[in-house]
Image (spheres, coloured by chain):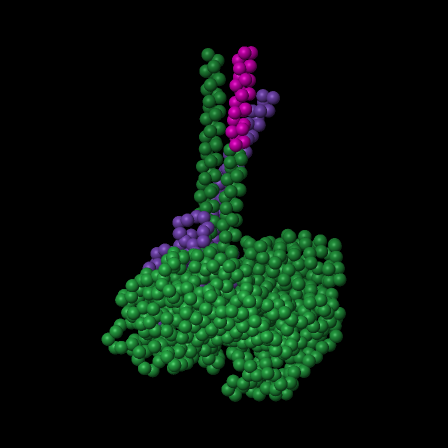
Chain colours: A green, B purple
Amino acid sequence: MPHTSRRTASAGSRPDRSQPFALFLFVVCVSLFVLVSFSQHQARADSAGLVRMADVESGALLLNSTEPGKYVPAPLLATDVQIDVTGPIARARVTQHFINPGDGWVEGKYIFPLPENAAVDTLKMVIGNRVIEGQIKEKQEARQAYEEARAEGRRASLVEQQRPNVFTNSVANIGPKETIVIQIEYQQTVRQDADAFSLRFPMVVAPRYIPMNATPQLVDFKPGDGGWGEILPPEEPLDLEQPPVLHPDMGKINPVSLAISLDAGFALGSVESAHHEIALIRDGPRKAKLTLAEELTPANKDFELVWKPVAASAPTAALFRERVGDEDYILVMLTPPAGQTLPKAKPREIILVIDNSGSMSGPSIVQAKQSLLWALDRLTPADTFNVIRFDHTMTVLFPQAVAAHGENLDVARRYVRGLSAQGGTEMLPALKASLIDPNATDNSRLRQVVFLTDGAIYNERELFTEITNNLGRSRIFTVGIGSAPNSYFMARAAEAGRGTFTHIGSETQVAERMSVLFEKLQNPVMTDIAASWPDGRNTQSWPNPVPDLYKGEPIVLSARMPKAEGTLTLKGELAGAPWEIRLPLDAGETRPGIGKLWARRKIEQLEADARIEGDWQKHDDGILKTALGHHLVSRLTSLVAVDVTPARPDGEALTRHDMPVNLPEGWDYEKVFGGEAMPTAKRAALHAAPPPMLAMAAMAPAAETMAPGLALPQTSTDAASLIRGGLLALMLATLLAAMRWLQRQWAHTALPGRRL
Amino acid sequence: MNAISKKAAALFWAAAIALCLGVGFYQIGQGLYIKAKAEVAQILLERAWQRTLTNGHPHKAWPWADAWPVAKLEVPTLGKSQIVLSNASGEALAFGPGHLLGSPLPGAGGTSVIAGHRDTHFSFLRDLKRDDTVTLTTSDGVTLRYSVGGIEIADARHTQIDPGAQMGIALVTCYPFDETARGPLRYIVFAGPKPDTI
């Protein structure tokens, strides 16, 4: 009896000890499992959020330094800027005076990052009172001409495109104490955000930038550098290694004078400069001239001009023209009404198409589902809707579009939440289904197809044919999902579908980007716009077809024809009533740069075609021809200016080591080359300016679609960590079993021992 | 009371051991499945590739596949041969290296970017040296010969490849090779066209 009671006591106390222990182990196992699977998911999410090529918007002449790959910016003495704004085009002429403060002959490199859409077409080098004009040449040819001149001691200058918005200008043989004047002209489109038009000119001087010759493949973007990238050095050593020289006094002087002539293309409302005082002179309702109220010293903030139209009740149109060679180039601008005078929108039929194929697995499907659910929440009871999902199979949720109210929306939400990503991508049947329109002639409703996909498809051509042939009254809005969707295809599909392209790269962007899209979808100002040109057969115009006009967007048509005469008729539907405008083509005001805009868009188009087809050689001829014809710097062409007479005497070398490094007083080397080179305000400005995707998709191929860089995908599997985790768990199991066995052994051996 | 606590203790132990065993076998199974999938898929892909070579059209290795063979990558010195798939989504990479959408197809000018998993198909990248020969056969049966130029290690968060920069191929995988956790580093092998072949 005492034995039993003892046994009871010990048996009773033992579970008291081992029970929590087993519980503890149990918890350990569970948390281990959770941790392993969580870390795997965590890692998966890391593959998104890659940094895109940001605008690089400031320039400096860089002199080679003793440290390979590092450059010292030469002091910029003075800058004169003249910008002519013509409707949506801004043409800038930047004249900069640089000095070589050293005693040797140097070669400098001038880096001028420009806003997206900027096209560099003119380079002038001023030596004494002679002006040397840059010639446009094929890239290799231009480089050869430059290198020959450099070797022969002649002054030369070469402008190359490094990336679509980063250009370099190399200047060879700048003499001791010599000043070189470089004039560059470029053209860009004005940014538009709803009814505000804006233009920015970079004024911040000499941030760090490491240029390389024409062969870079990798561009390295450090997190805090606000878009200042570092092109990774290639294998061979750098071209030139002269030490830099900077006169102590030169770094501080940097006056900028700036003048803008503004022809907005519409009745001007307010004209404001965000950061600088300006002197404004109005010249009629549409024009203004302005200068900086005082010369800026130092120039430490970007100049930003914002102008707004006077609210109008109907769209206004503007027309500009230019004759280049045997051809006329035309630019037409249609501005929607701004402010509260917006015509009332019609109810809509929205078809939401979601790709749930295997390539969407991971974060993509989560984003796509969120976007779709977001869209469902924004439908109004007057709208009708349907949902289609596809992988290699396809499901149309309702037999036809149904009213967007409680029960139907609930069915759709449940359905969407239940989707998972697997299988192949067969987009064509889904596209066909989305374009089946039983009420094709019903003009009381707008039919909008929203397509959420990553665009991993192979039959682009068939898809384009389907869109072009069967679009009818529908409009296609593509939403690219994931970190690297097939943007080229989707931007073009939206263009053919007369809609817009939106890119959603991460979950955090869903609400922001989708609300911009839905703001557009809910506010179509003018639909079914058709442009008929007098000489239709010989006219090439973009965009084609003309997209609808949404709130906050202008329509910009760019065209080329043998002779601009006759009448362009633009027809459309405004708030349910037909609208028509006739523009006599020969009445437009002549403005330089209209031809360049056309050429720039043609090159963009050809580059996009090359990307869509995955064939880069096929379109090179066309790009080369257009760029050479219009004097534009491109991927294949450069500007080169070469002086005829040698400047550097035969005996003297283009020195590499004669000049000691002499940083100006007050210039902290760390600050010049370290992360603090760019003022915080500018860094913030660079980050805070994401391209307005929709507006840009309507005006020109969106910036993101033109970003040439390819994100690098995640390329490791879970296999190793799974196996490792598994082995760990098995070891734990063995350990547990062993402990349990020992415990039982102890229980059995201890008790008889006590009995004695 | 006594019997119940004893029973409960035994149950806890059994549950803990069973769970660890379960988790262990499940994870090992998953891990081996990934490796096996990578190997077996290449056999099926090879079959689909042969069909593509005969008529030039894309053929999927299995009907529900989301990617199809677009090229064959070979490294004669290492005895490696792999079918390259049409995209580099996570799904596709489980079965073979994938060609990045947005970069040109091999032979079409520019830099073709091909990505693969460091622990399966592209584990051999660490053995590639400068001037090694890499060949790519395109779907029209043309064999392109490349020689390895530069090798870079880059941070994928801040680095992109410019597909228009240069004629050639870029083979991308994760780095470091023996790391099991997913990280931002990528190992990139650039190869340019071999001078003796155009």
Q: Position of residue A537 (x, y in %)?
A: 59, 85
Q: Is residue B37 above or below residue A495?
A: above
Looking at the image, which residue is at 61% across and 66% down?
A: A193
- Dividing the picture into quadrants, the one containing residue A181 is bottom left
- Give the residue displayed 45% in from the left and 53% down from the top: B184
Using the image as rendered, state which of residue A169 and residue A376 is in the foreground.
Answer: A169
Tell me residue A32's x, y (percent): 50, 40
The percent coordinates of residue A377 (x first, y second) are 69, 56
Residue B168 belongs to the span the image colors magenta: no
Extreme-left residue of the structure:
A651
Q: Is residue B175 above or below residue A503?
A: above
Q: Which residues are magenta?
A: A1-24
Q: Toward the viewer: A405 or A396?
A: A405
Q: Front-most of A244 and B56?
A: A244
- Can see residue A407? yes
Residues A493 and B196: in front is A493
- Is A680 drawn above or below residue A494 in the view shown? above
Q: Taking A533 as reference, is B75 above or below it?
A: above
Residue at image point 55% right, 17% down: A8
Q: Quadrant of the N terminus of chain A?
A: top right
